[in-house]
Image (tube, coloured by chain):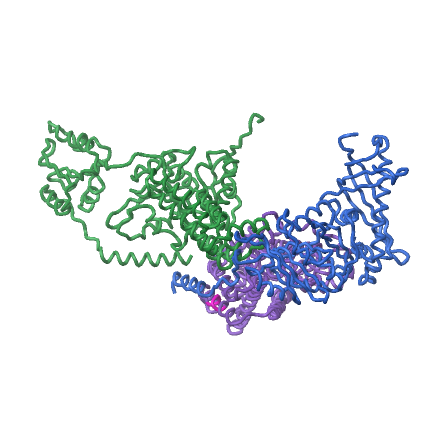
Chain colours: A blue, B purple, C green
Amino acid sequence: MSKAGKLLLISALFFFLSGCMDRIDLEDATITLMAGVDVNEKDELLFYLSSPVFSREAKKKSEEFGVKAESFRQARARLDEMVTGLTLSGKIQAIVLGKRLLEHPDWFKILDVIFRDARFTVNARMVYFDGEVGDLFHFQPPDKPRLSLHLTKLIDTANQRNLTVRTRAQDFHRQMFEKGINPTITAVGKEKAIKILGTAVLSKEGTYVELLQSQETMLLQLFLHGKEGEVTFTVPIPAPNDSKKMIKHRVSLIAKQASKKVKTTFRDGKFHFEVKMKFGGGISERLFPFDMEKDYKDMEQMVNAELRKEFEKLVVKCQQNEVDPFGFGLYARAHAYQEWKKVQDNWPKAFAQAEVKFVPELSIKGNGVIR
Amino acid sequence: MKKYAFNELTVLQYVFFIHGTQVGIGVLSMPRELAEEAGTDGWISILIGWVCATVASLLIVNIMKRYPGKTIVDLIPVFFGKWLGMVVSALVACYCALAAMTVIANGIGIVNVWILSQTPGYVLAILTVIPTYMVVQGGLRVLGRYAELIFYLTLWMPIVVFSILPYSNWLHLLPVLKDGWMPVFSATKSTILSFLGFELAFFLYPFLQRKQYASLGIVVANTLSMLIFMHITVFSFSFFSPDEITQYTWPTLNLWKVIEYRFLERIDIIFLAFYLFFLSTTTLPYMYFTVFTTSQMVGSADHRKHLFILMILIVVGAWLYTPTFIDLKKWSEVWSMTGMVGGYIIPVIWWLAIQLFRRGKGGQKG
Amino acid sequence: MGMRGWLRRRRASAKDRFSHSSVPVPAREISDSLSDNITELRTMFTLTPDLVIRTFESKFVEGSVALVYLTGLVDKSSVNNNVLRPLLSQQSEGPASIYDLLSVGKVFNIYDFHEVERQILDGSSLLFIEGRKEALAVETHGWPQRAIEDPQLEASLKGAHQGFVETGMQNIALIRRYLPNREMKIKEYWVGDRAPTRVSLLFLADVVHPEVLQEFEDRIKLIRIDSILNTGELEELVEDNPYSPFPQFMMTERPDSVASHILQGKVAVVVDRSPSVLIGPATFASFFQNVDDYSTRWLVATFIRLLRFMAFLVATFLPAVYIAVISFNYEVIPLDLILSVGESRERVPFPPLLEAMIMELTLEMLREAGVRLPAPIGQTVGIVGGIVIGQAVVQAGIVSNIMVIVVAFTAISSFIIPNYDMASAVRLLRFLMMGLAAMFGIIGIVIGMMGLIGHLISLESLGVPYGSPLAPVRFSDWKDLFLRLPLWSMKNRPASARVVQSKRQGDNRPRGDGE
């Protein structure tokens, strides 16, 4: 057979065999940007999705639907009956979990498809919604862009200021499987507008345990990631009859760099963690007179003491609730492996017994442009 | 003597040829396989596997040095006689074909899972067969150039992995040797098989231009592969939690899934598409040596006819039968077992035989 | 390799076919009778009104003389002043031979009519003299020809502004001006049985690899054809792989670029009557080089080189990537982009492949229309293309905005590739890639890329690897590949051309005042 003949045969085969089986043109697709899961009063699963509408004839810029189903895939089939195009899940930006869902242990299995189906994105942000997910999906603020984009942006920027964590599905998967840490996800609520509440800490089964406020989240983030994004904290400085004044003695610091060292030991039947954290910070706000040039050491000491108090308060709060959002378990495994092996399947309990010492070492690098 | 003069390989081509053959389908699942056996200490097993592979490949080069200008296919009839030689040659061809098929089938399987879930396997088989034919018909010389060029073209891929550095946690790797040496050794079995590909030195040696670099070249090739394995494994271990990594079939691909740039997201899709280049540097050599062996068996110098038949067989095979993922696993196991024999056991026995023979001869003289 | 063997076979059979039909007839000798010769000429050239046969008596020879030439092919003033006048005005029967009278440089004897025919058709004037069994060929070429102009296809900013013309000898002269070296040798062949064309191979004898030269010569010798009218025809008859979209020889109309290639150890072929010169062996990378690269500063030239390779990638793959991304792998586009693409695609009634095809074909048509039209009308094409099609097509909702941008970007990129043949190859490849992308998405593109690489590395030009110095890698040549390093760093000729003598220059690195 001549070469040309071969080529012809091959190309003929091509055109007969290929049916462009995987092709879905963008205009035929409904790109899901936000998915939600919730449970109703009868413990039935509800699935929600929100996707943008491109048509110029449509008044609304996005469509939202909710269906009752037993799994994500079943929900997709139901949704395909309603939406214009074929639902595609490769661009989901946020997965919203309802308050009631997180009361059920083992709900995590529902998310199986996200990790099993390779086309699913694992970069969706995990969100805990304090309320019914349906309310969120049908919320249409006129002064905001498409809800899904608004929520995504909100989480990302809040995370930049360290007001909440940004846990993507992949991170969440890791946090669920890793024995030495408790999952933490963004907590969102709705009043007049959608609002970041802070960080939700979940138990190893995935149930909701506690909420960390923004200042606490900042400490958590500082511990987990060092200085990432902008870290500002406002510290109260003890002063006589402070509570009565309108202007209180407060100083705000912006962290410039942070590095931590965790010393792990196992003594007297429990784990001891000593966290040494070095900060370099600049003062961004000071609401009381202070001679910085002379007494900056005192200032450092005062702030250190306050930080330490706050951090230890946070740790105690977590220990009381038997959760370890810090991942001290990782340190236990890395440095006291034999003891860790005994408690690894029940680490949060062991953590509740552990002793955590926090030693901040602040050095003030800047004082702003006024004295 | 000068039978293969036309198809000479430069030293770099020889290095990249072997390196390309070694880095194939294994890299995708390697972190999981290691983690299953040895936890996060699996990277030590890679080092041990590398030492084993290097020793075995040096043995092969040493053996082939004794038969200048001859490939294994030329040697078989000398050792086994005509008819038994035929059988052994057929076995060699089958081994190469099995290796090529396993990688192709696995590659098609992964593409089917990851990107083109609706496209039937045989269409993808046709798709892979066309460039394969274009390269392999040019013979070893073109294959050498291909291996070399692809190496440079894919250099960016290990570098992009560095973008997951912000997400990695080196605490996962501690403590080193947490459960002692035993798991590390048991994981070594899978790593030494990942280095398979150096056994092609049995074929390649006579084609090499400057024979004095044969040993050095094969060590460099093994080291390059080791570095790639190490790079991927260590990064996977630092990214995934040790409790989590065993959940994934192909952790290496999941690793890429989180990388996002402002202009590009889901790098895993692009990575997987370009990974076909890596797979091609594994399949093409095996494919070539399959048809090289068969055409030498029937005594024809032109391998293209056999290649064409093989290509048709692949397409027809893929059309009649799509392997399940269990089948794929079995194929890989069979390949590993035969590779163990061909790449490790035979060189050792052969080399020992040569040593004994030599000593015997020396004894007679003395 | 197989391709070449196959070609050989084909050529050999062609040779057989021709030699049967035109058995060489032994040429008739010139007789000593002038009238016989004139009769012979008349029978040879029937229906040739432009043949001039002038018979006259001259004092210095006994009997008459006939001057024969083709008007139009000779330089009239040369014939009149340097041939006719001395012969006619000669009064005394001096001892001077006829050679002393003709004030023309090249005069030689010919003895048979075969040669007579060729010389007349080549523009020489022939003198037949009563009683002599020979004819004198006087070189008086002077056919109509064009003045030397700026090269059209390969304009240069800083380089020379002389382009080749249609006279082979003049072209050789242009090249020789750049290479006044006795090692520059010329081998001449006549190609074509009916209308032979002078084909000259120019090379540096001490630099070129003998095998490469031999291969080139053999291929030219094997050609059996009526006639070749231009270099392109010759190229098609000698190239290695006739099915490849890539040009396997370089064609240029610039004498300086020919000289630079000859200096690199390549062989140039000047085809008479054709204003472009063939250079081989060519490599893929050499199509991305330009003479201007060497006359601009090296940093600038490097930047432009990189731009060209990027343009190659963009021109080949961009529409394919666009198709793949919006109909298969939309996951890889960032969210904001996907929203704006989605909005612009919303009104388009066609699938992406068809949309891209419409635009690409329109563009190719516009380009082709512009090429043949005279400049004033050519501008209209631009207006029609730019405003009417670009604007209106989007407003009518036939094509999306983004597609127009993609197509425009692709077009600009393909104009950056300096070689016309390479740019045309890229145009074809683009359609192939678009088809693959429309069927298999990114996987299709990668498979196409693999095939492209496989083709490029197995392709050869005169037995020299086409992909060199990329595959096989020759790092020493990379100084003049993606980058254009300073000239003083390229001490050796490129290894890709397989030269025999590789030293090009000594240590020329400028060191300033310090040393």
Which residue is nearer to you in this view: A62 or A166? A62
Q: Is residue B230 above or below residue B338?
A: above
Q: Which range of residues does the magenta coloring cover?
A: B309-313
Left or right of B36 in this view: C149: left
Q: Is residue B359 visible?
A: no
Q: Quadrant of residue B88?
A: bottom right
Q: Main secondary structure of the magenta part?
A: helix
B274 inside magenta stretch: no
Give the x, y percent position of residue B226: 65, 56
Give the position of the C terminus of chain C as an image quadrant: top right
Left or right of B317 in this view: C367: left
Give the x, y percent position of residue B21: 58, 59
* Residue lying at the far bottom of the rendered structure: B83
Q: Quadrant of residue B17?
A: bottom right
Which residue is nearer to you in this view: C490 or B36? B36
Which residue is nearer to you in this view: C283 or B272? B272
* Residue lying at the far top of the rendered structure: C513
Which residue is nearer to you in this view: C212 or A359? A359
Q: Is residue C222 visible?
A: yes
Left or right of C60 in this view: B146: right
Give the x, y percent position of residue A286: 80, 35
Q: How many marks?
A: 0
Give the x, y percent position of residue C35: 9, 42
Picture residue at 46% right of the left edge, 64% below the top: B303
Give the position of the N terminus of chain C as an image quadrant: bottom left
